[in-house]
Amino acid sequence: MTLRLSLGHIDVYDDRTATFAHQLGLTGVQLHTPNLLPGEAGYWSLEELRALRERCDTDGLRIDGLENVPLAHFWKVQRGLPGRDEQIENYRTTIRNMGAVGINMLGYNWLPTFVWRTDMDVAGRGGAKVTSFDLAGIGAGNALASYRLSPTELLSEPITAEQMWANHQYFLDAVLPVAEEAGVRLALHPDDPPVDEPLGGAARIFNSPASLAAAREQAKGSPAWGLDFCLGTVSEMGGEDAVNEVIDTLGPLGAIFYVHFRDVQGTVPSFRECFLGEGNYNPARVIRRLHDVGFNGFIIDDHVPAMVGDPDTWLDISSGAYCSRGRAHAIGYLQGVLNALGLD
């Protein structure tokens, strides 16, 4: 397939989601921690995955990928705790089941304390609601721990960078052979925010273009490993220069599997999210550069500003409310860029 757009960040797939995708002219969807596990299995079952695939097929929509198994099924793996081998075996089962039903992309993150923001209700352009991060604000005690973890769920024992790297290597060594056999590719999301300081007790290790290249070295050339290229997170590292470095390093190797397309204003230690076209990089230049290095994966909308008629705050959005107007703007913007570049 060639470079294409897909509807992203879908937690619950339903008729409304399918209709929205079709209204936007999209033919694919990517689901984020989909609600597939009402029980205690610890993995995505063959039956549930097959039902999801058949539902999307019936709706005329391709599943471009899934990302982020439930945190309850992965946290011991990230933290290197007793019980991780059982969670890894369950993860391997998920990979095999995905391959068996023809879903061939699984994104993952290496964030035991997930995504951090210090303000979830900042006024962006025209009063649209966006999130922001300021490392200095954490010392003042006013940080919101993350989108998905409360402060009471943070680490009781710190995890060093060395431990995080070792845990990641252990994980890759266990799952990549299974992924290769099943025909499923695993895509790493960079650390957001990409700060050097630990957040919630856990070191952030995938916080620079060089560290993402080092992650590929850990994969030992496996064709089953690549990057979930979150442009916003890499922009937080160093703007368009950082984005270009990742594209030029991993793109020619075929190690960029798909793209989260968003941007921010500013870089660590302080930034805020924004509309496409008003951030650190030029979206058209980035898409052209991706195309020129041979990227042929899919692009999804990512965090978007909450516009008039969307949920009131990002706290509502992070709880599951869908920001349809902000997403429609982002998809329309990207469709226009692809059309103008002759890439649609």
Image (cartoon, rainbow, N blue to C red):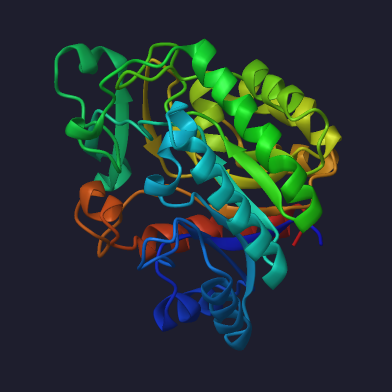
Q: Do we see residue 183 in this rendering?
A: no
Q: 140 and 43: which one is in front?
A: 43
Q: 307 and 316: which one is in front?
A: 316
Residue at far left of view: 141
The residue drawn where x is 38% and y is 20% is 202
The residue drawn where x is 75% and y is 40% is 290
Quarter holding the C terminus is bottom right
- Vertical position of residue 69 compared to residue 159: above or below: below
The residue drawn where x is 48% and y is 52% is 69
Query: What x and y, as percent, mark residue 90?
Result: 54, 52
Query: What x and y, as percent, mark residue 222?
Result: 81, 37
Residue 329 in the figure: left or right of residue 289: left
Query: What x and y, as percent, mark residue 28?
Result: 62, 69
- Vertical position of residue 232 compared to residue 164: above or below: below
- Vertical position of residue 240 compared to residue 10: above or below: above
Quarter holding the N terminus is bottom right
Residue 263 in the figure: left or right of residue 309: right
- Quarter of the figure with residue 300: bottom right
- Vertical position of residue 200 compared to residue 58: above or below: above
- Quarter of the figure with residue 104: bottom right
Query: What x and y, as percent, mark residue 189?
Result: 56, 37
Q: 44 and 61: which one is in front?
A: 44
- Quarter of the figure with residue 331: bottom right
Residue 131 in the figure: left or right of residue 221: left
Residue at far bottom of view: 58
Residue 316 in the figure: left or right of residue 96: left
